[in-house]
């Protein structure tokens, strides 16, 4: 996954700085989820390999009309869970192997139609 960050086209005065809200997030494991909600926990997300086997397309969204902001020097040194896991010699993210991406659908604000299936 790649991410690009663009400069906010609005000024600070365009935002309502008086309106605030909070959201509390609680993390729980599958057993606690069932106890709290009375429902089975959500299924784990599909892996890249499962996604590829299903023949689903990948998407590439781009904005060639905006300049990409330079990344944060503070965040540049952050390591992914996968990188740390490999350095420790374990496999924290099972099924997180890279795949050969063959079907990519390019999307941009200039394109008004995006087909959902590469074969269509």
Image (spheres, rainbow, N blue to C red):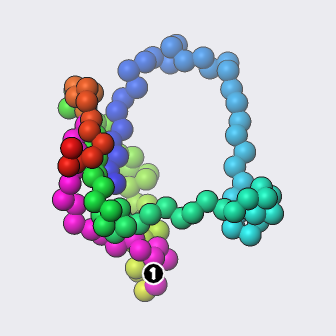
Q: Is residue 100 magenta?
A: yes
The answer to whether residue 70 of the structure is visible from this angle is: no
Q: Quadrant of the C terminus?
A: top left
Residue 92 picture location, percent across and down: 49, 77
Q: Is residue 61 above or below residue 41?
A: above
Q: Could you tell whether 110 is left or right of 6 in the image?
A: left
Q: Is residue 118 above or below residue 82?
A: above
Left or right relative to 98: residue 74: right
Circle 1: element type: loop
Residue 59 coordinates in the image, percent (x, y) = 28, 47
For label 1, the residue is 91
Q: Nearer the viewer, residue 116 or 8?
A: 116
Q: Quadrant of residue 112?
A: top left
Report whether residue 89 is seen: yes
Residue range of the region highlighted in magenta in the rendering: 90-107
| Above-or-below relation of 2 to 67 | below
| Residue ID at (22%, 28%) | 111
């Amino acid at each position: 996954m790649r991410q690009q960050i663009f400069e906010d086209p609005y000024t600070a005065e365009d935002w309502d700085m008086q309106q605030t809200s909070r959201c509390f997030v609680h993390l729980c494991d599958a057993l606690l989820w069932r106890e709290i909600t009375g429902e089975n926990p959500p299924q784990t997300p599909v892996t890249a390999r499962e996604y590829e086997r299903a023949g689903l397309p990948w998407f590439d969204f781009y904005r060639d009309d905006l300049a990409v902001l330079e990344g944060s020097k503070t965040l540049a040194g952050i390591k992914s869970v996968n990188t740390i896991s490999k350095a420790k010699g374990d496999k924290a993210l099972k099924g997180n192997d890279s795949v050969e991406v063959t079907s990519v659908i390019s999307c941009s604000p200039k394109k008004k139609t995006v087909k959902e299936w590469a074969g269509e």
